[in-house]
Amino acid sequence: MLIGIDFDNTLVTYDEVFREAALARALIDADFAGTKQEIRDRIRVLPDGELAWQQLQGYVYGRGIAGAGMFEGADGFLRRARAEGLPVVVVSHKTEYGHYDPDRVNLRESAREWMRENGFFAESGYGIPAENVFFEGSRAEKLERIASLRCTHFIDDLEEVLEDPDFPPDISRILFSQNKPIGTAPYAICASWQQIEEVVFERA
């Protein structure tokens, strides 16, 4: 087995970072409470909202990533994978620099630093080799990487990735989504990392 996992919004949750950054830029009101997607939808209807959203993303995925956290249950999943000797690779579509980011922060290095700070590479943490992390410049390159690594499972938060015609057909697909009803797709849909753990290790 080789378990492949997406990075942004699959392992890492940015909801609170997006809220704080949007509030600091007066893009949302102080009483607004919503997910990243709800914040995006609110900002996009503003004058020049698409530009404001792109600039906000550039900050959050770069300098702001230090304030991001892991989804509840992801820690337990990674520790169990290590305990049972199941290798993990992280494969993500992530450009090197954000759009409209005047500081030109390297998003890939920011993500790797976040992983280091959160014990991904440490023997005392999850023990994932640093060379098992791949950031690709496009979705097509991401799919090519997943296929070349010969993953047996892949976990992603985006339906369009798992349903892409070029997604390798022999890989067990798992969608991490709290919004899509279970049983509405030809792959597993899990609303939590605890459910993902049950799906992966039940079939291991």
Image: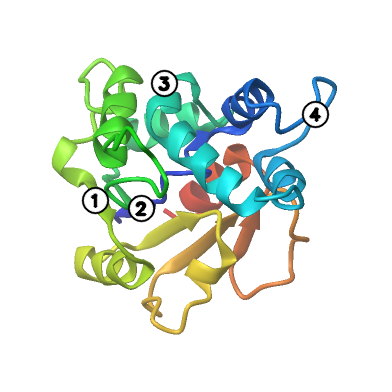
User: Quick one: label 2 or label 3, which is nearer the N terminus?
Assistant: 3
Mark positioned earlier in the residue sequence (4 or 3) = 4
Around disc 2, counting alpha carbons within 10 Å, would you say few (fewer than 14), some (14 to 19), or many (20 or more)? many
Dot 3 corresponds to which residue? Answer: 66
Q: Does residue 196 appear anywhere in the picture? A: yes
> Of callouts 2 and 4, which one flags the residue occurring earlier in the amino acid sequence?
4
Query: Residue visible at 80% across and 28% down?
Result: 33
Tell me the quarter of the picture where residue 170 sits.
bottom left
Q: Amino acid at mark 1?
A: Phe
| Residue picked out by circle 2 | 92
- Mark 1: secondary structure: strand
Residue 104 in the image: above or below residue 176: above
**Mark 4, other Cα within 10 Å: few <14 / some 14–19 / many ≥20:** few
Mark 4 vs mark 3, CA separation in Å? 21 Å
Question: Looking at the picture, which amino acid does disc 2 mark?
Answer: Ser
Residue at the outermost bottom position: 165
Q: Say whether marks 2 and 1 touch (CB < 8 Å).
A: yes
Considering the image in quadrants, where does the N terminus appear? bottom left
Residue named by callout 4: 33
